[in-house]
Image (tube, rainbow, N blue to C red):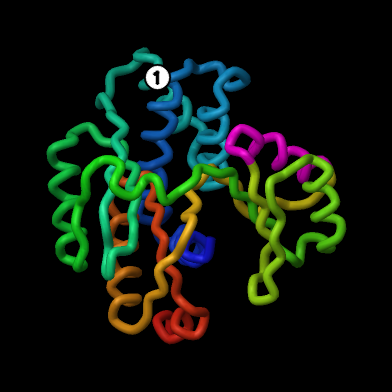
Amino acid sequence: MSGHNKWASIKHKKTATDAKKGKIFTKIIREIVVATKENGAQVENNARLRKAIEDAKEANMPQDNIKKAIQRGTGEIPGAVYEEIIYEGYGPTGVALIIEVTTDNKNRTASDIRKMLSSHNGNLGEVGCVGWMFERKGYITVKKSAADEEIVMNTVLEAEVEDFKSEADSDAYEIITLPSDLTTIRNVLKEKNIAVESAEVTMVPQTQIALKGDNAKNMLKLMDALEEHDDVKNVYANFDISDEDMEKLNA
């Protein structure tokens, strides 16, 4: 999961800047609208909407914005009609990419994604070209400073998670679950007063491609460009960059 983890850490640092630009609000509002339209406005019966609202609160989104997004999803107030699309393609040196978008204009979005990939030595592929390389999993991180390793490990293993990782060079524990178990495991941790740093359903690559030098730099620039696009909801990739090279690139 190293490719996912490294990009996740970069995204975490970007969050404050994105929020100031309003980008994070735009993405969350779209998620609330789609989640409401898909499964209704009753939070207790709509896990996707519940997660979107939690994300909105963590981003300090005003309650009025959340309410209006739900009303747009139910059709109470007018708004854009969004479509969810998954693009698959390749980055520098054949890195596999899965790009999830929410858009009100699929032709515009497809053109934008294609241009971004092409300008970073990548290309858009056919449906299914890389999807088989990834598995959908629940992914939770807990800061090592939040709790003792044995306590966290015993707590999640008793809850029957798929995997628990505590890498020496990481400042967080990693917990892998079935997507359907994500909310349950997060709540188990909260009940034990163990603070959860992040919790998401993600696509975990089965293998990684090691990148160095210009290839690594171009890959990170591509990921950044994709994440900055208003229509892009999530980006998953199977790249791996050593900690040493990451330090050089972030210097």
Q: Residue at x 28, y 64 (%)?
A: 94
Magenta-drawn stretch, dominant element (helix, strand or loop) = helix
Can the viewer see residue 17 in this picture?
A: yes
Q: Residue at x 55, y 22 (%)?
A: 46
Residue 50 coordinates in the image, percent (x, y): 57, 29
**Crowding near the residue tagged with mark 1, few <14, some 14–19, many ≥20 C-alpha atoms within 10 Å:** some
For the C terminus, which image quadrant?
A: bottom left
Query: Quick check: 87 left or right of 109?
Result: right
The one of 233 and 204 positioned closer to us in this rendering:
204
Quarter assignment of residue 212: bottom left
Asked if 90 appears above or below 182 in the picture, the reply is: below
The residue that label 1 is drawn on is 37
Q: Residue at x 38, y 21 (%)?
A: 73
Query: Quick check: 113 left or right of 63?
Result: left
186 part of magenta stretch:
yes
Residue 43 coordinates in the image, percent (x, y): 58, 22
Residue 126 coordinates in the image, percent (x, y): 22, 44
Q: Residue at x 31, y 36 (%)?
A: 102
Quarter assignment of residue 82: top left
114 part of magenta stretch:
no
Give the residues drawn in magenta, as a range: 178-191
Residue 237 coordinates in the image, percent (x, y): 39, 58
As helix, strand or loop, the secondary structure at mark 1 comes to helix
Asked if 33 appears above or below 216 in the picture, the reply is: above
Quarter assignment of residue 171: bottom right
